[in-house]
Image (tube, helix red, strand yellow):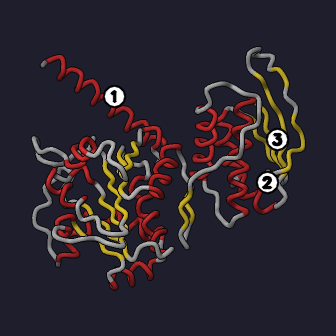
Amino acid sequence: MNAQEVISSPSRNTRTAATDANHFILTFENNRFASELFGQFDQHLKLLEQRLQVDARARGNSVSISGDLVATNQARRALDFLYARLQSGGTVEISDVEGAIRMAVAADDQLTLPTMERKAKLTMAQISTRKKTIAARTPTQDAYMRALERSELVFGVGPAGTGKTYLAVAHAAQLLERGLVDRIVLSRPAVEAGERLGFLPGDMKEKVDPYLRPLYDALYDMIPGDKVERAITAGVIEIAPLAFMRGRTLSNAAVILDEAQNTTSMQMKMFLTRLGENARMIVTGDPSQVDLPRGVTSGLVEALQILKGVEGVSVVRFKDVDVVRHPLVGRIVKAYDAQYAVHEESEKIDL
């Protein structure tokens, strides 16, 4: 354990007889790390209190935690994980605290029977590049990152804000830095999201860049900007519309297709058959946000059905609870999904 546990005194909560209470003090050896761990004005501890319904009070490099036995142990595991992250040279932001809490809670939720034994330390899948290290913030992200390590073709599907594309680009950057692939190929179908943009001025790069901007943003987060520009110039990183993939064989490459819900059946088949020797392919998209003309089948939806159970193919499905943007985004996604479910049910009744 990274922190020294000074006090541990389980007791019975008098307000709720069926609930066990716990109180302990964690003392961290490094004062600077402890300060970063607690956050400015103890904001990280306040988030622990809010999410886990515990009482967390800092004093110097120590924190006193009290509350429900399960919740306090979740808080301890989250803090222990985050402190280890600081020790290894990482940083702790409010989003990292949120992720550690989610993973600590999920570890308990997966148990079939309650137990009084202390759980093991949190283990989260990580992606490391020279610029930053990313740890999974939800159990689904953890499963996704592990699937990226073991499978040649991975589908990451689900709502916006769950990290599908971001983690895919991070994994591709990691493979490139380790020398496991020679290049990265990033692609998207050039489909307008419900708008008619008309004629776009400029050369080909200027015309397609607006469609590919999210991929650029993720790349610059993983790799220093000057290296990204040099890699693009040298062809080590290629960012191109899906239409440019036809007729090619992509070998020794990490290939990502983003916004795949906007591919047609033929486009998806064309893309998947580009997979060459020693290549990894990642397909991301949200089947609930198809911008194709009415009546056109989404290539992503069809591929998920056709490739079900095929060896070497992994499918990871994200849900609204996996949204790692602003908490309101998750609630928005959940509200829309509920509304879509009502419409689908009414259409079945009409039939």
Q: Nearer the viewer, residue 309 or 280?
A: 309
* Identity of the residue furthest to the front in this view: 311
**Residue 41 in sight from this viewpoint:** no
**Left or right of 277 on screen, residue 198:** left
Dot 2: element: loop
Q: Please, is residue 248 above or below residue 2 in the view?
A: below
Q: Quadrant of residue 266?
A: bottom left
Q: Is residue 329 above or below residue 220?
A: above
Nearest to the observer: residue 314 or residue 215: 314
Instruction: Mark 2: give few (<14), some (14-19) or many (20+) Cα within 10 Å.
Output: some
Task: Say which residue label 2 marks.
Answer: 2
**For the residue marked with disc 1, what is the amino acid?**
Ala
The residue shown at (63%, 49%) is 123
Question: As shown in the figure, which amino acid type bears the numbered disc 2?
Answer: Asn
Q: Earlier in the sequence, mark 1 or mark 3?
A: 3
Q: Classify 347 as above or below 323.
A: above
Check disc 3 and report the residue beneath it.
64
**Helix, strand or loop at mark 1:** helix
What label does residue 338 carry, if any?
1
Percent of width and height locating residue 170: 46, 64
Front one among 38 and 274:
274
Image coordinates of residue 209 in percent, x first then y, are 26, 70
Residues at marks 1 and 3, CA–CA distance in whole angstroms? 41 Å
**On the picture, is 28 further left or further right than 171?**
right
